[in-house]
Amino acid sequence: MRETASIKLCAVIPVYRHENTVKAVAESVVAKGIHVFLIDDGNTAEAKNVLNGIANEVPETTLISYSKNGGKGFAVAEGLKAAHNAGYTHALQIDADGQHDLNAIDFFWKAARKHNENLISAFPQYDESVPKARLQGRKVTNFWVAVETLSRDIPDSMCGFRVYPLDTVVPVLKKIRDFRMGFDIEILVRLKWAGVKMNFYPIKVNYPENGISNFRVFKDNVAISWMHTKLCCGMIIRLPILIGRKIKKNG
């Protein structure tokens, strides 16, 4: 556990079909003095055995298992709530497939201490391994996020490497509607609506060769499109508040 006078940091790692890569991620995080919550999101019995072994072998690791797959957002949300209930004030969300540069953890932890009431998020710096379709999809989503928040304050809404201030974030989880791949997007929009300040910093992202993707091309794209439709409607309802904040910020 990383701790200062008022901040206690842990990590939340959602795991679904990445049981073979998550151990290295967990070990790297624990080596930095950070307790890890592994969230088993309805993996197979064989994968659950692997995760149980990791929890037993890697110190400062707590495994929370679910029998059915609820989606990445479900796993992250349950991990954040568990961390909050355990007394942590901040939680670092990390993907289990090893695509994020874990050397960035120290910098993000320092940023969280400096801006302890803000959400600290990464925006990705890709190498040649990134699928081109992913890049185009991110551009479309980031455009709609700018519309939904009436701002360009969120340069990337899909990167799963973030430090959440739990006292602020946990109550907002009750308003989330997409607990699958749209979660990372929706939680940022709703936090922005709630007036939460955010800091974004670059992180190197590599897509591992032969890596496993849990993104369901048709179902998740449809779900994310529907989510954006609902968020746009929510923006219209909140329009006077958002415009008022924008005027105050620019004035």
Image (cartoon, helix red, strand yellow):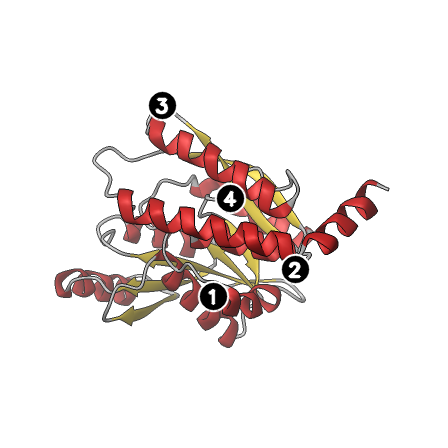
Secondary structure beneath label 4: loop
- Residue drawn at (45%, 52%) of the image: 227
Q: Viewer-proximal residue, 232 or 205?
A: 232
Residue type beneath disc 1: Leu
Name the residue tied to disc 2.
194
Q: Residues within 10 Å of mark 3 (few under 14, many from 20)?
A: few
Q: Earlier in the sequence, mark 2 or mark 4?
A: 4
Secondary structure beneath label 3: loop
Secondary structure beneath label 2: loop
Q: Is residue 7 above or below residue 245?
A: below
Q: Earlier in the sequence, mark 4 or mark 3?
A: 3
Report how far apart the C-alphas of labels 2 and 1 lie in the structure.
18 Å
Image-based side of 52 in relation to 221, left or right: left
All told, the count of numbered labels is: 4
Q: Viewer-proximal residue, 53 or 239?
A: 239
Name the residue tied to disc 4.
157
Residue type beneath disc 2: Ala
Report how far apart the C-alphas of labels 2 and 4 lie in the structure.
16 Å
- Residue drawn at (44%, 72%) of the image: 82
Name the residue tied to disc 3.
128
Residue at the top extreme of this rendering: 128
Q: Earlier in the sequence, mark 4 or mark 1?
A: 1
Q: Is residue 94 visible?
A: no
Report how far apart the C-alphas of labels 1 and 3 lie in the structure.
32 Å
Q: Earlier in the sequence, mark 2 or mark 1?
A: 1
Name the residue tied to disc 1.
80
Residue at the bottom extreme of this rendering: 85
Q: Quadrant of the C terminus?
A: top right
Q: Residues within 10 Å of mark 4 (few under 14, many from 20)?
A: many
**Which x, y percent locates residue 1?**
50, 64
